[in-house]
């Protein structure tokens, strides 16, 4: 499957979508991304698990394109989950079936095909609700 990428190639405005026909890249320019077919969510990980350990766990099921352990941006500690990318969907599905329920560092692994992020991710809401903050209804004091 071919992916369309936002391109920073000269002659295009930053952020333009470039069709997959344009495969001319260059140093630091990524025009076309091929091959990443399945992204796998791996949860309930120990904070001590390394990317190399995850790579070794997935390698018997096929080629591993990348492993990303998600870390807290302030402390730098693992948040207990990771994403593993595999080049073919069949290898990824075999890995999911083969690893589901296994234990790594005394924790049972939670594994599934990752879902894409939604547009509105929720997050914190500041000042919403009835009359909170400035403005809103004024109360009579007396």
Image (spheres, grey):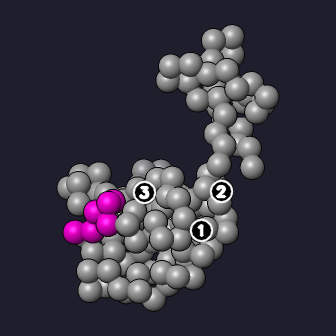
Q: Could you say which quadrant of the image residue 25 lies in?
A: top right
Which tag, 2 or 1, sits closer to the chain's start? Answer: 2
Whether residue 97 can be seen here = yes
Which tag, 3 or 1, sits closer to the chain's start? Answer: 3
Part of the protein shown in magenta: 48-54
| Residue 26 screen position, x and y as percent | 56, 19
Q: Secondary structure at mark 2?
A: loop
Which tag, 3 or 2, sits closer to the chain's start? Answer: 2
Residue lying at 50% horizontally and 19% vertically, measured from the top left: 27
Distance Cα–Cα, label 3 vs label 1: 13 Å
- Crowding around mark 3 (Cα neighbors within 10 Å: few <14, some 14 to 19, many 20+) is many
Distance Cα–Cα, label 2 vs label 1: 8 Å
In the image, residue 125 lies in the stretch drawn in magenta: no
The answer to whether residue 7 is above or below residue 72 is: above
| Residue 104 screen position, x and y as percent | 32, 80
Q: Secondary structure at mark 3?
A: strand
Q: Which residue is mark 2?
A: 37
The answer to whether residue 136 is above or below residue 90 is: above
């Amino acid at each position: 499957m071919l992916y369309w990428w936002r391109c920073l190639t000269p002659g295009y405005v930053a952020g333009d979508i470039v069709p997959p026909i344009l495969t001319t890249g260059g140093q630091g320019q990524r025009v076309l991304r091929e091959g990443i077919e399945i992204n796998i969510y791996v949860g309930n990980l120990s904070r001590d698990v390394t990317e190399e350990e995850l790579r070794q766990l997935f390698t018997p099921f096929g080629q591993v394109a990348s492993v990303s352990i998600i870390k807290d941006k302030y402390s730098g500690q693992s948040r207990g989950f990771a994403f593993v990318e595999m080049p073919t969907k069949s290898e990824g599905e075999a890995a999911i079936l083969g690893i589901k329920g296994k234990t790594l560092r005394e924790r049972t692994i939670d594994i599934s095909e990752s879902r894409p992020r939604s547009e509105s991710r929720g997050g914190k809401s500041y000042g919403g609700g009835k009359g909170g903050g400035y403005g809103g209804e004024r109360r009579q004091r007396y």
